[in-house]
Amino acid sequence: MLMKERSSGMYHLSSYYVARMVGDLPMEFVLPTIFVAISYWMGGLKPSLVTFVLTLLIMLFNVLVSQGIGLALGAILMDVKQATTLASVTMLVFLLAGGYYIRHIPFFIAWLKYISFSHYCYKLLVGVQYSVNEVYQCRQGLHCRIRDFLAIKCLRLDSLWGDVAVLAVMLIGYRVVAYLALRMGLHH
């Protein structure tokens, strides 16, 4: 449909692309907001409005980056079945390499976590839930810092703003790739 309308000169590609991104925003924001509003409080997470809002913002950021990947893959492949298959495989790899499901990733694929938006999102979500000096009872009468717990310590939560920056680069980068792929695909 895009190629047909573009060939008739109805509008510029940039107009279509921006309209597409802006038109998707209501659903990209409403559904995750409903999901987080329900699951956050049911999950027994930190009962703080600030933490809830930060969690919601991280999840919305995650959704926008995911959408960017989908746009980029769709624009590069220009085939719904192929793009859906590749997007599913890519998301699975990103989730597995992100560190949530598997902590000890084999060294030859450990680099995948650095290109996985799930890794950065997970770090931000954990960083929001557990403050620097928060403690838990690790043994009878002994309290330990939560961030010293091995599963959390290995995440290296000392650079959360760096993680936000990486996600912002991914957000913009995937959308630029999608736009360029559409532009190049229309000239062939």
Image (cartoon, rainbow, N blue to C red):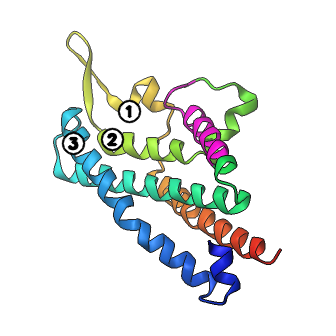
Residue hosting label 1: 147
For label 1, the SS is helix
Image-quadrant location for residue 61: bottom left
Say whether marks 1 and 2 touch (CB < 8 Å). yes
Residue hosting label 3: 38
Foreground mark, 1 or 3, reads 3
Q: Position of residue 132 (x, y in %)?
A: 33, 41
What residue type is disc 1 on?
Arg
Q: Nearer the viewer, residue 82 or 181?
A: 82
The residue carrying pointer 2 sits among few (fewer than 14), some (14 to 19) or many (20 or more) residues within 10 Å by Cα, namely some
For label 3, the SS is helix
**Residue furthest toward the right?**
188
Which badge, 1 or 3, is on the more N-terminal residue? 3
Task: Please check the rendered image and state whether residue 97 is part of the magenta-colored stretch, yes or no.
Answer: yes
Say whether marks 3 and 2 touch (CB < 8 Å). no
Q: Nearer the viewer, residue 127 or 73?
A: 73
Query: For the residues marked 1 and 2, what is the alpha-carbon distance in whole angstroms?
Result: 7 Å
Residue hosting label 2: 132
Residue 8 in the figure: left or right of residue 45? right
Say whether residue 51 is visible.
no
Please determine whether, in this image, residue 153 is positioned above or below residue 62: above
